[in-house]
Amino acid sequence: MEAEGYSVFEWSDPPGRVYAPHAHPEDQSHWVISGAIALEVNGEEYVLRAGDRDYLPAGTIHAARVVGDEPVVYLIGAK
């Protein structure tokens, strides 16, 4: 991700964590290391699991929730 120009940091969320619809002013990419997180974008839900990665252009309204009984750990890249 850094080679693609992203500033990268690791993040984790506990089971049950929910993020209401929101947007970021920068492009973002999430790369799941363990656990699972569901993203809702434009009325569609996508579940990302270990090894999966997404790309959200700046201004994309999205919501998220942790799926399952274990924490989700992922990398967040922003540029």
Image (cartoon, helix red, strand yellow):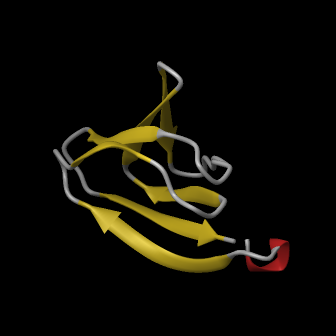
Looking at this rendering, what residue extends furthest in the top direction? 43
Question: Residue 46 versus residue 23: which sits nearer the camera?
Answer: 23
Q: Quadrant of residue 34?
A: bottom left
Q: Is residue 49 left or right of residue 70?
A: right
Query: Quarter holding the C terminus?
Result: bottom right
Q: In which quadrant is the N terminus drawn?
A: bottom right
Q: How far from the left and from the top, in percent, is residue 42?
A: 53, 24
Is residue 63 toward the left or the right of residue 44 in the image? left
In percent of width and height, residue 16 lies at: 16, 45
- At x 37%, y 50%, the residue is 35
Near-viewer residue (52 or 39) = 39
- Left or right, 21 with reference to 52: left
Vertical comparison of 40 with 30: above or below: above
The image quarter containing residue 77 is bottom right
- The tally of labels here is 0
Question: Which residue appears farthest toward the right when viewing the image?
Answer: 3
Could you say where residue 57 lies in the image, as x and y percent from the top left?
68, 49
Residue occupying the point 57% across, 43% down: 60
Task: Using the image as rendered, state which of residue 23 and residue 9 is in the foreground.
Answer: 23
Q: Is residue 46 above or below residue 4?
A: above
Residue at 60 percent of width and 78 percent of height? 8
